[in-house]
Image: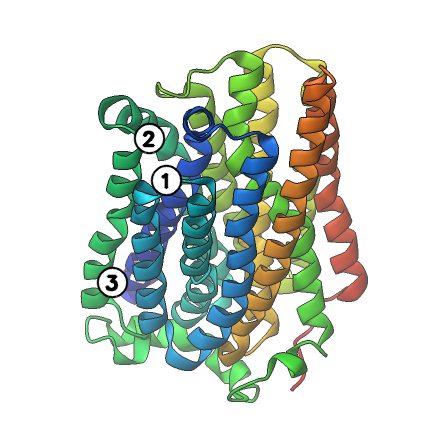
């Protein structure tokens, strides 16, 4: 009864964030799905492809840093508008390029634009949700990456077969402009949103009293980097973000190589894998929110959810022992779902530990660290796969990569636990 009286406009905002992330990841993942076709058209090898991925991730890293800072200053409404406009234009520009260098430039611009999504999204959830609902709201936001990843293997092969690869980029890239119309009409911060009932506004602002003393105004990057809480988030992102980029950019190619999956047709194994990630995002966010409602301290609930997620990534190492596609799909599905459960909770610890005016800046710093790791990891992947492909044993290459993927989350959790055992509030 209480929830009905409170109102649900905040969940509509969560849906908008979910939709933005869905479009973000369709525009991002299309490149991985078109990889076999583009390799034929442009005569790429694994190293060429990894360098183009690096162009995206390097610009994504730089963009995260500056978007985080900008969004803390100009606000989420305008910040998101700029971000979505840039990435939608960049996505459509892929259809016009004629060379490998051109693809690198288009991917770089896409990375700059898409880097605003998470700093803006996490800050928006902090503005619109109390602590006990934030991880679930972030899980909904983050599940858009999974729906985008599910929609891609269905939509992109059809667009490729019917219209060609250029049209695939144009059609998917145009989706962001449709979202922008809705965002500009229906979004404002809670205090200025006329469609929001006062009871729901009071509920949203129920955490404001304990955060009022920490409202520090503008906080510099230098000062944030002196806080151990910032470094815990940075470590969590650096060691785990590259794994999601691997799942996004190399899994289609992996299934094509080992199971002769035709990427010009809707790919059921990929749909199943990426559908699992949606369960992970929402389930991981729900887990810590449920534990908090049960009376667990916030830090213990978040840390328990992160540990469960880290353990559930490990089974990906076992894929090397099976040649059955559905066993492999099951193992990878569990691991990518756990990846997203981790993501929902690692983002949630930022508003737990920092005042609202510093959230986007901290998310940007951590996002930059994660993107730097994601720049380095494709170099490693490209070298390993090309080396073992030339040696006639590409299986060994993927074995090494999956071993790294399976262990990185436990390493990240141990570092976070060492730096901030109780995830206390950062002092300003």
Q: CA distance from mark 2 to mark 3?
A: 25 Å
Residue 305 showing in the rendered view = no
Q: Which residue is mark 3?
A: 183
Disc 1 packing (10 Å; few <14; some 14–19; many ≥20): few
**Element type where label 3 sits in the image:** helix
Q: CA distance from mark 2 to mark 1?
A: 20 Å
**Element type where label 1 sits in the image:** loop
- Check the image and name the residue furthest to the right: 418
Q: Is residue 370 left or right of residue 24?
A: right
Which of the marked residues, 1 or 3, is nearer the chain's N terminus? 1
Which numbered circle lies on residue 159? Answer: none
Q: Quadrant of the N terminus?
A: bottom left
**Element type where label 2 sits in the image:** helix
Residue 127 showing in the rendered view = yes
Q: Which residue is mark 1?
A: 98
Residue at 42% x, 27% y is 271
Marks 1 & 3, CB-CB < 8 Å contact: no
> Which of the two residues, 421 or 26, is positioned nearer the viewer here?
26
In the image, which is nearer the foreground, mark 2 or mark 3? 2
In the image, which is nearer the foreground, mark 2 or mark 1? 1
Q: Is residue 236 left or right of residue 205?
A: right
> Which of the two residues, 139 or 223, is positioned nearer the viewer here?
223
Q: Quadrant of residue 201?
A: bottom left
> Which of the two residues, 198 or 224, is positioned nearer the viewer here?
224
Residue at 50% x, 50% y is 56
Q: Which residue is mark 2?
A: 156
Check the image and report above or below for 339 versus 323: below
Which of the marked residues, 2 or 3, is nearer the chain's N terminus? 2
In the image, which is nearer the foreground, mark 1 or mark 3? 1
């Amino acid at each position: 009864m209480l929830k009905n009286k409170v109102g649900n406009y905040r969940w509509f905002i969560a849906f908008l964030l979910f939709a933005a992330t869905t479009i973000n990841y369709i525009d991002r993942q299309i490149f991985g799905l078109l990889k076999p076709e583009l390799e034929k058209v442009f005569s790429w090898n694994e190293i060429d492809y990894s360098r183009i991925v690096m162009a995206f991730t390097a610009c994504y890293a730089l963009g995260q840093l500056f978007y985080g800072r900008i969004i803390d200053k100009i606000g989420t409404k305008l910040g998101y508008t700029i971000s979505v406009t840039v990435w939608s234009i960049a996505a459509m520009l892929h259809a016009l390029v004629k060379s490998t260098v051109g693809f690198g430039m288009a991917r770089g611009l896409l990375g700059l634009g898409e880097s605003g999504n998470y700093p803006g999204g996490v800050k928006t959830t902090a503005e619109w949700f109390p602590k006990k609902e934030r991880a679930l709201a972030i899980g909904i936001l983050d599940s858009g990456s999974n729906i985008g990843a599910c929609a891609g293997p269905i939509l992109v092969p059809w667009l490729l077969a019917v219209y060609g690869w250029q049209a695939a980029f144009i059609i998917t890239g145009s989706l962001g402009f449709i979202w922008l119309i809705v965002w500009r009409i229906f979004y404002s911060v809670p205090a200025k949103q006329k469609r929001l009932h006062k009871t729901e506004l009071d509920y949203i602002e129920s955490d404001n009293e304990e955060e009022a003393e920490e409202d520090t105004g503008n906080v510099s990057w230098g000062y944030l980097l002196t806080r151990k809480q910032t470094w815990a988030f940075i470590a969590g992102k650096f060691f785990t973000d590259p794994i999601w980029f691997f799942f996004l950019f190399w899994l289609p190619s992996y299934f094509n190589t080992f199971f002769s999956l035709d990427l010009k047709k809707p790919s059921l194994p990929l749909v199943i894998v990426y559908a699992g990630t949606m369960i992970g995002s929402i389930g991981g966010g729900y887990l810590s929110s449920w534990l908090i409602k049960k009376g667990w301290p916030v830090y213990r609930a978040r840390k328990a959810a992160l540990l469960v997620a880290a353990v559930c990534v490990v089974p990906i190492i076992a894929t090397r022992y099976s040649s059955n596609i559905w066993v492999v799909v099951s193992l990878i599905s569990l691991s990518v779902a756990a990846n997203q459960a981790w993501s929902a909770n690692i983002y949630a610890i930022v508003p737990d530990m920092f005042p609202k005016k510093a959230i986007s800046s901290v998310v940007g710093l951590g996002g930059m660290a994660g993107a730097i790791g994601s720049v380095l990891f494709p170099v490693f992947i490209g070298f390993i796969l090309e080396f073992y492909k030339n040696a006639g044993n590409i299986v060994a290459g993927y074995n090494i990569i999956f071993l790294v993927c399976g262990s990185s989350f436990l390493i990240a959790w141990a570092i976070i636990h060492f730096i901030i055992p109780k995830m206390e509030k950062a002092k300003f």
